[in-house]
Image (spheres, rainbow, N blue to C red):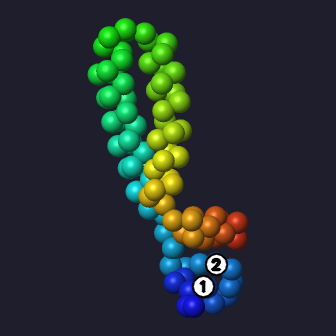
Amino acid sequence: MESPYHFDATNHRVVTNVSANNKVLIGTAALYSVSMYGYMRRYLRVDGNAVAAAAFAAFSLPAAYSYSRFFLSSAEDEAALINNQREGRE
């Protein structure tokens, strides 16, 4: 099986053809916006509980990031980026 990655000639642990993408951050922003819109429309409008709204906003952001990272990122690309960072290349 052939590797989809190209490695540096001087340091064979550095992957040269991988770059970070913004799909995860864009997906996080979209999912967080939709969930906050839905919460404000369905619950906050009815009871007006600001503490519950703040708690939902605080706990919804990590959940949105986790879902976006699971569905929109590649484990191999993320591992290559972490490896390049540990090797001193960014």
Is 75 situated above or below 32?
below
Q: Residue 6 sits in which quadrant? A: bottom right
User: How much space separates mark 1 and mark 2, taking CA atoms?
Assistant: 6 Å
Q: Is residue 41 left or right of residue 60?
A: left
Q: Position of residue 59 (x, y in %)?
A: 53, 30
Is 81 situated above or below 45?
below
SS at mark 1 in the image: loop
Q: Residue 77 sits in which quadrant? A: bottom right
Residue highlighted by disc 2 = 14
Q: Position of residue 26 (x, y in %)?
A: 38, 50
At 51% from the left and 54% from the top, the residue drawn is 70
Q: Is residue 11 left or right of residue 73?
A: right
SS at mark 2 in the image: loop
Residue highlighted by disc 1 = 7
Give the total of numbered labels.
2
At 32% from the left and 28% from the top, the residue drawn is 38
Q: Amino acid at mark 2?
A: Val
The reply to whether residue 55 is visible in this rendering is yes
Q: Which of pointers 1 and 2 lies earlier in the amino acid sequence?
A: 1
Q: Residue 78 sits in which quadrant? A: bottom right
Q: Amino acid at mark 1?
A: Phe
The reply to whether residue 88 is visible in this rendering is no
